Image (cartoon, rainbow, N blue to C red):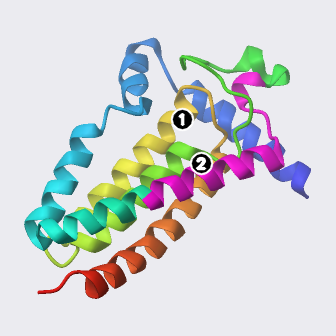
Amino acid sequence: MIEQLLQYDTALFVYLNGLGSATWDSLWLAITHKYTFAPLYAILLFLLYRQFGLKSLLVFIVVIALMVTFTDQITNVFKRTFMRPRPCGAEDIADKIRFIAVRCGKYGFFSGHSSNTMAAAVFTGLMLKPYYKNLIFILLLWSAIVAYSRIYVGVHYPLDIFCGMTFGAISGFMFYKLGTYAIKRFVKD
């Protein structure tokens, strides 16, 4: 059963990765770059500051740092545990895929980009939902686009992306709960 699932995953990867073209490569490389969205993160921090104040922002920064560290480290634990090679390192499909990323990496299950961006989207989307009710949908779309970029550049299978996004959503919700608790506990009105 697992073997069949992995075969479907590989076939879907080959199809989705094959949709790319040289015309769009630089755009997707920019989307997948880890510093591209630094301005978005700055805007989200500003919105948190604007709605909650400086003391709360400092608490949020600590919670966000913990969240990113958590998702990143758990992702690495999964990669070292499952040791699923990335598609860019799979010799059996090397002639069928477009690999345009800067580097390949060794293991890919599950995607750190997907888990981190989804956690950030869920956390900030839920925190700011009372003030900007549609922001969470924009952030979820942004996270999905970043996740797809990992397939486009050839470094993750769809299952890596799906599991990363699922883990990120759960983590983002957990840290949202932690953040709301910390604000009530440590920030006095």
| Residue at 76% in and 23% down | 89
Label of residue 135 in the image:
none
Marks 1,2: beta carbons within 8 A: yes
Q: Residue 145 placed where, x, y %?
A: 41, 43
Q: Residue 126 placed where, x, y %?
A: 31, 73
Is residue 72 shown in magenta?
yes
Q: Is residue 121 left or right of residue 97?
A: left
The quadrant of the rendering that contains the C terminus is bottom left
Q: Residue 37 placed where, x, y %?
A: 30, 38
Q: Secondary structure at mark 1?
A: helix
Q: Which residues are magenta?
A: 66-89
| Residue at 47% in and 17% down | 21
Amino acid type at image mark 2: Ile
Amino acid type at image mark 1: Arg
Q: Which residue is mark 2?
A: 161
Q: Which residue is mark 1?
A: 150
Q: Is residue 170 left or right of residue 74?
A: left
The quadrant of the rendering that contains the N terminus is bottom right
For this rendering, which residue is in front, 77 or 182? 182
Q: Residue 85 placed where, x, y %?
A: 78, 34
Where residue 30 sits, quadrant-wise, is top left
**CA–CA distance in space, label 1 to label 2:** 8 Å
Q: Secondary structure at mark 2?
A: helix
Pointer 1 or 2: first along the chain? 1
| Residue at 67% in and 21% down | 97
Q: Is residue 56 left or right of residue 118?
A: left
In the displayed structure, 147 sits above or below 85; it is: below
Mark 2 neighbour density, 10 Å: few (under 14) some (14–19) many (20 or more): many
Q: Is residue 134 visible?
A: no
